[in-house]
Image (spheres, rainbow, N blue to C red):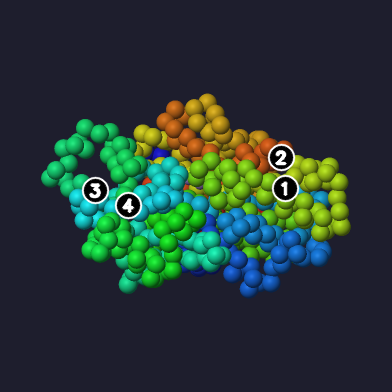
Amino acid sequence: MTTFKTVWEGIKPEEESELKSVSDGYLGFLDNAKTESEAVEFFMKELDERGFSDLETVAKLEPGSRFYLNHIGRALAAGIVGKRSTVNGLYIIASHIDSPRLDLKPKPIYEDSDTNTSLLKTNYYGGVKKYQWVNHPLALHGKIYTKDGRSIKLRLGEDESDPIFLIPDLLPHLAKMQADRKLFDGISAEELNPIFGSIPDDSKEDRFKSHVLKILKDRYGIEEEDLASADLCLVPAGKARESGIDSSMIAGYGHDDKASAYTSFRAFLDVKEPEDTILVLYFDKEEIGSQGTTGSQSNFLEYVASLILHKLNGGYEHIDLTSLLRRSKVISSDVNAAMDPSFKGAHDPNNAGRLGSGIIVTKYTGHGGKYGGSEAPAEFVAYLRGIFQKYNVRYQFGTLGKVDEGGGGTVAQDFARFGMNVIDAGAPVLGMHAPFEIVSKADLWSCYRAYLAFMNH
Ligand code: MN
Ligand code: MN
């Protein structure tokens, strides 16, 4: 047995009250920001209340200016111009605000007259263990856009009085046909079909489908085809909860990567007058490879950086932009795995993050021989250690599992390609990508302190 120091040991009373304030705020965020659009709405409200200006329309930037850029409600940047302007580059914290879930297909509704039901066809989003998503209460979130320009926001299944949606698994009494399947194939993608309704409209041919279409028409004024111009998904219904007899943890949906997004945003709002220009970035699409107009592979960062230069200096040369990006520094704030107490064999005990031991600094990601990942230069790791020690941040080093056990990536590589220093650091999570994941309140607080230290450096 090895003993790892936890954040809880030697925590001071004022630190404990800050920890409680961060975890209480986080619970509220989780319940209101289950999708990327809801996270952007949450952040935008806070930015508006604090008088941040739209980077695209603000006439001029100067030290102390506070700005944001909202990209179609799914990706967001917020920044404060530092006293030293952009001399030392930008100090960036980037995380993703999408989480694994079940998206609806463009033509989702079908009926199964054999079973007196209408159902929804789904397309899982991100790396899920599909069998975890059955028999779990699901809520329908998203927006529908009609061709006459209306948008209808849905958030059905979160209020006590709302119906929830459920994908029933086969009863154990009759599950012989599943017995020979491998665990990961226990439920297949095309079996992830939640039941949508079960009352027939006897005047129509498709009795069960017609009835749910009539409800959609009466309640929301939408036609079946409107569901094709919609971003609709099923997410775990209900609120995040404190967990453990000591309430030391939070169990909830989407710690990956809302834990990083919330703590970095909160730290950002708590930076008063930064020396250098700070920027927090929130991306969508990370769980499906970061492609797309709101993913980190898009030119969002370049656009934000060029607007910053333009509004600071009234114009700029291309070399100014590439040089600014090159001298910037980034924490790619994303969660890592905490060592699983029942599956310790998946981890290298010397290099696994532990629940409660603080933010995990992850020097490199990837799988196999570091393949497809991003690695921070040792000098930058040393630089970060210096900052964390200066601000008494509790941190640990970790990698994601045994070398040939699997692996993963983050948004880090999309920053590295500009030649800037970037490193991954985020909270340890148990049960990552499951409908309900676990994070320690101590680690959330450690992330908040780490991101605050980086922006204040
Ligand atoms: Mn992540
Ligand atoms: Mn993930």
Residues under numbered marks 3 and 4 in contact, where contact means CB atoms less than 8 Å apart = no
Query: Could you tell me the amino acid type at mark 1?
Result: Glu
10 left or right of 202? right
Which secondary structure, mark 3? loop
Residue at 31% over, 66% down: 163
Q: What label does residue 110 carry, if any?
A: 4
Query: Which badge, 2 or 1, is on the more N-terminal residue?
Result: 1
What's the CA distance linking mark 2 and mark 4? 47 Å
Is the residue indicated by label 2 positioned so its CB lies within 8 Å of ligand 1? Answer: no
Q: What label does residue 418 carry, if any?
A: 2
Query: Could you tell me the amino acid type at mark 2?
Result: Phe
Which secondary structure, mark 4? strand
Residues under numbered marks 2 and 1 in contact, where contact means CB atoms less than 8 Å apart = yes
Give the percent coordinates (x, y) of residue 38. Answer: 51, 62
Query: Which badge, 2 or 4, is on the more N-terminal residue?
Result: 4
Q: What label does residue 35 carry, if any?
A: none
Label 2 Cα crowd, 10 Å radius (few <14 / some 14-19 / many 20+): some
Residues under numbered marks 1 and 4 in contact, where contact means CB atoms less than 8 Å apart = no
| Closer to viewer: mark 3 or mark 4 | 4
Q: What label does residue 169 carry, if any?
A: 3
Location of the C terminus (image quadrant): bottom right
Which residue corresponds to mark 1?
302
Query: Which badge, 1 or 3, is on the more N-terminal residue?
Result: 3
What's the CA distance linking mark 3 and mark 4? 19 Å
Give the percent coordinates (x, y) of residue 348. Answer: 43, 33
Residue at 50% over, 43% down: 288
Which secondary structure, mark 1? helix
Query: Could you tell me the amino acid type at mark 4?
Result: Tyr
Q: Is residue 255 visible?
A: no
Label 4 Cα crowd, 10 Å radius (few <14 / some 14-19 / many 20+): some
